[in-house]
Amino acid sequence: MLARRTPSLSGVRAAILAFRHASLTRAAAELGVSASAVSHQVRKLEVELGVALFERHANALRPTDEGRSFLEQAATALAMLEAAAEGLHRDANEVRVQASSSLAVRWLIPSLGRLAARHPRLRVKVETIAGVEPSSESGQWDVSIRYRRQGETGAGERLMPDLVLPMVAPRLPALAIYQSRSDIAAIPALRCTPDDWDWTLWCRSQRIDVDMVRIGHAFDTDDAAIRGAVAGVGMVLASSLLTQAELQGGALVALAGFEPVELGCYEIEMRDGERSAVRKFRQWLTDEAEGRQRASSL
């Protein structure tokens, strides 16, 4: 049996970008070449593989079933190859950490002073991702901090629970109407998830009809929604982990009548977990999470 020749990396990279953007033009723009050059590379790759990767229509580029399977695996493999090549010249004391922008800005980055005190030579490179759940394929990272909703399973190691409460600015006018849990409809709720899954799960845990929660302004991150609550535009569902400064400073207060509810948890996933710098960072991160949980329970 004759072995197939390994396909060219330039063709694989061009096809991955065309798949990711669903467009030869946008793939070409990222590569800095013409769309016809990308088209030529993709067709050459298809000949090398003996498989059609895309269905081509007038204004659309759709992957075939075989193409989708190949390109999803190839994207992961290419990211690993690029990371391995970069690792040849990396600082042994550097740890690349991927986390949601809200978790990074509100918890991870403010804690880095304690990391420096424990490991002065360790350097952290933080990559922030919009939303709460970074993709395992995106970016080049050593440690990724992920979010898992209650009931979901993940491949990572549990770091800490996400315990949330409805929070408001103490000067919010609607608080004058609020007397008990049954008055929650009087306070506009802020949206920070696309499908309001957080409010839905929270209402279910509190045995509250989800229709009683009146959604007002919408934000794309927890950080933005928390800032909206501080500005007095509504009620945010958030954890003390992300709102520690606002709670301590009095900019936010927990809505009376409710106890913290675990809607999910944070997990950590590691690449090259045997590397000394990664092991040190993981242990520090775990200690920070445990310390934060102890402080919250006091």
Image (cartoon, grey):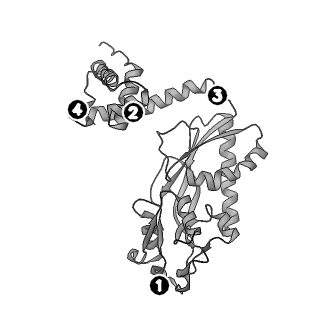
Mark 4 or mark 2, earlier in chain:
4
Mark 2 to mark 1 CA distance (whole Å): 51 Å
The amino acid beneath tag 1 is Ser
* Label 2 packing within 10 angstroms: few (<14), some (14-19), many (20+): few
Foreground disc of the pair 4, 2: 4
Residue at image coords 39%, 61%: 195
Foreground disc of the pair 4, 1: 4
Residue at image coords 30%, 24%: 39
Residue 173 falls in which quadrant of the image?
bottom right
Mark 2 to mark 3 CA distance (whole Å): 25 Å
Q: Is residue 162 above or below residue 183?
A: above
What residue is disc 1 on? 182
Foreground disc of the pair 2, 1: 1
The amino acid beneath tag 3 is Arg
Q: Is residue 163 visible?
A: no
Mark 3 or mark 1, earlier in chain:
3
What residue is disc 3 on? 90
Mark 2 or mark 3, earlier in chain:
2
Query: Residue 130: horizontal and vertical position, in percent?
Result: 50, 50
Residue 251 falls in which quadrant of the image?
bottom right
Query: Residue 51: horizontal and vertical position, in percent?
Result: 26, 25
Q: Residue furthest top?
A: 2
What residue is disc 4 on? 56
Query: Residue 199: horizontal and vertical position, in percent?
Result: 45, 68
Mark 4 to mark 3 CA distance (whole Å): 41 Å
Q: Is residue 2 above or below residue 76?
A: above
- Disc 4 and disc 3 in contact, CB within 8 angstroms: no
Residue at image coords 45%, 28%: 78
